[in-house]
Amino acid sequence: MKLGGIVPALVTPYDGEGKVNYEMLKKLVEVLLEDGADGFYVTGSTGECFLLSEEERIKITATVAETVNGRVPIVTHVGMIGAAQAAKLAKEAERAGATAVSSVPPFYYNFKLEELVRYYTAISDATTLPVMVYNIPRYSGVIINADNLGEIKKSCRVEGIKYTDSNLYELERIRTRYPEMTVMFGQDESFLYSLPVGVNGAIGSTYNFMLKKFKRIWNAYHEGRQEEAEKIQHEACRIIDALLQVRDITAVKYLLGRKGIVCGDCRSPFSPITEAQKQLLDGIGDLD
């Protein structure tokens, strides 16, 4: 997979009627490209994937692909509970212009390992694109580790993993056992601490509004300026502290609005942002 560096997990902007605002989405993509985005992860957790219709998910991919016009990779999250539905989305995402597809493991029914394998095999059989496993056990309830990832890889064409978990030991096991895989880290608050493991890059929600800050961490670390990298990571963590007092996606959308990219609230049943939460976020300092 030709994916690496700092990759925003895009939010999904809505208009005043709660419909996807595709024009605002285009604006967000262009702004992030100007700021140095190395790719985009669309219709993932940050994009409220399970609150979107299948048609919306594919149109979002098509809109981002049209705007990007080949400048950077686009990974489309196609996760569903059903293998057939996820495979259908993968096929449509390829037609819409994605350069890779990604999926959380199927959840809710406590699927066995052979059933996880069957799920990812259905996705990889439906498309010629690289497939990326999305490990986010906090939300999915399913842990992808070095052992079960190996079983999945034996049976289907998995070329990468989005690893959104705090267990850096398991991340290191995956990195060393599968050096050929593209490994993207997904926890913005500990981004810097994943770099010594040898990740290819990171995919994160806060990159929607402080992409430049994480690009500076990336560059400082790889140029040997460790103290500078640590200082910027600490700055990012203090901002994330405030986000977590609201809700990360809600806060990201509000902070984008301060930059002129009006994204609306998250879809119900998420609660609208309150005035008190706005005041808290307005107290955040420099986002760049």
Image (cartoon, rainbow, N blue to C red):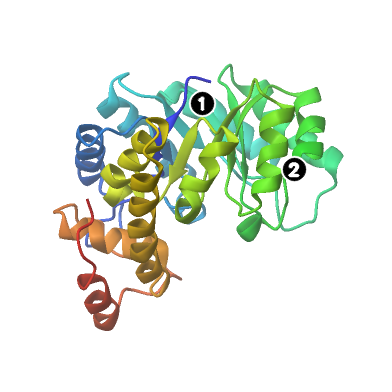
Look at discs 2 and 1 and give the one toward the viewer: 2
Question: Which numbered disc covers residue 195?
Answer: none
| Residue 279 coordinates in the image, percent (x, y) | 22, 78
* Residue 172, placed above or below residue 286: above
Above or below: residue 134 compared with residue 90: below
Residue at x 27% of width, y 51% of height? 209
Query: Residue placed at 33% from the left, 73% from the top?
Result: 272
At label 2, the amino acid type is Asn
The residue at 40%/50% (across/down) is 230
Q: Position of residue 87 (x, y in %)?
A: 63, 32
In three-dimensional space, the C-alpha distance between marks 2 and 1, rounded to whole angstroms, equals 21 Å
Residue 145 spot, x, y in % from top left? 74, 43
Name which quarter of the figure residue 88 lies in. top right
Is residue 50 toward the left or the right of residue 288 in the image? Answer: right
User: Amino acid type of disc 1?
Assistant: Ala
In this image, 251 relative to 169: left or right? Answer: left
Q: Does residue 267 appear in the picture of this structure?
A: no
For label 2, the residue is: 145
User: Against 203, is 155 above or below?
Assistant: above
Q: Which residue is mark 1?
A: 100
192 vs 15, nearest the viewer: 192
